[in-house]
Image (cartoon, rainbow, N blue to C red):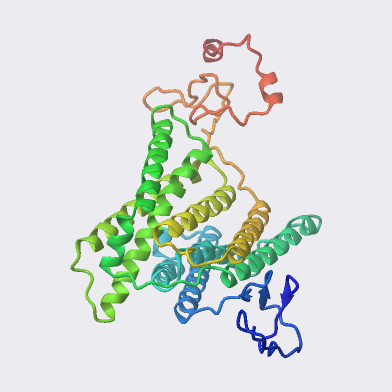
Amino acid sequence: MPAHKYLTSRETAPPSGSGESSSTEVGHLLPNTIELNGTRPVSLFHHISNENLIGTLLAIFGNLLVSIAASIQKYSHVMLAGTKDSRPIYRSKAWWLGFLLTLLGEATVFVSYAFAPVALVAPLSAVSVVASSILGFIFLREKSKPKEFLGRYILVFLGCAFTVAGIYLFVTFGPNSHEQLNAENIIKHVIGWPYLLYLLLEIIAFCLLLYFYKQHNKNSFFVIILLVALLGSVTVITAKAVSGMLVVSIQGSLQISYPIFYIMLVCMVATVIFQATFLSQASCLYDSSLIACVNYILSTAFAIISGAIFYLEFNHEDVLHICMFVLGCAVCFLGVFMITKTKKKAMGFEPYVTMDMMQGIPTIHSKGWVVQPDYNGSFSYGTLVNSDNVAPTLAEAYPAAYAASDLKKD
């Protein structure tokens, strides 16, 4: 039998050692099974179980809701900023609609963990990236000049195409295992030596990163995002455990009376809070599109690894399906990178103190204080000392011969 022979759906292999001829009926070739060196046929495509299908659809729907909610909230910000209305943003009906849709979307994604493996649900957050790009182009009218259209939006369209292709690949070839997540199974996974070893390595890595973050004041971008990704790997494990036990409880077998349920719930809430804290600090220091891209790639990779170790999601998968799944994730990562790379960076705004000059004398406060702040070697008057973004031409305009004390005297 030649290697890599494609079989039809009606083809059967003869028993080993029998002298009977094969009952193979030669018909049109379907690339759904493959026979390697006389071994039994291996299916190229999974028959997706009902549970996986439900979980996948819930995750897609939840991420779509999150992206729609973000667009609605951004639209409310834009509309409120374009008027003279001084109301706080949280009093806008559109903002509350976006907030409620966000809660509904996140709850839907949370429920999807009870039906589908982590390796399928975690990468599907790319759906929100694609949907946000489309909504931003159509609904929010985020358009560029004609000269920038080809350089920006063609790349976005290609990125969306790559992302959709990657989603199709990793959903088609992803793990098809489903386990009833009751308290006994969760405890069995927790005390398993593969996860205990992985958890030990993860704690050591997290402590080292946190040490550099705190003691050496290393506000490095990758340090912060790695901390978020490590916390996220614990979040998806605990979220799947809590969601699974809640679904089993609803089905009739009460699981919330076990202590492991509350342990997982506390770990899930704590890791989510710490993730939000680190991401909030990163958003103040770095560009949001860069954060979205790198955080998606690292968090998804760590989530897949942790799900494979904790829930043994790839134990019954062959090498072909695992390689195709990894290829799908890589294509999806490339698509997300192409989408976020073309995002317009927000122009940095630095508040300053307005100087009302009259005959060269700055305005004086009622208490006799001069409005002009101390120079302190910074070109950012009225703000914190930050000369990182100062162009070299500005630095040449202020020679080193003029000290801060001289400027005060003037």
- Count how many numbered circles sit on residues in the image: 0
- Which quadrant holds the N terminus? bottom right
Residue 129 lies left or right of residue 199; in this view the side is right
Closest to the observer, 283 or 161: 161
Q: Can residue 139 be seen in this view?
A: no
> On the image, which quarter does residue 132 sit in?
bottom right
Rendering coords of residue 363 (x, y %): 49, 27
Closest to the observer, 370 or 198: 198
Q: Is residue 248 visible?
A: yes
Placement of 394 over or under 232, stated as above or below: above
Residue projecting furthest to the right: 147
> On the image, which quarter does residue 179 sit in?
bottom left
Q: Which residue is drawn at 37% across and 54% down?
A: 272
Q: Which residue is drawn at 57% across and 11% down?
A: 403
Residue 399 lies left or right of residue 272; in this view the side is right
Closest to the observer, 354 or 330: 330
Residue 264 lies left or right of residue 303; in this view the side is left
Q: Residue at x 55, y 79 (%)?
A: 47
Closest to the observer, 26 or 347: 26
- Which quadrant holds the C terminus? top right
Rendering coords of residue 108 (x, y %): 42, 72
Residue projecting furthest to the left: 257
Rendering coords of residue 277 (x, y %): 39, 47
Rendering coords of residue 107 (x, y %): 39, 69
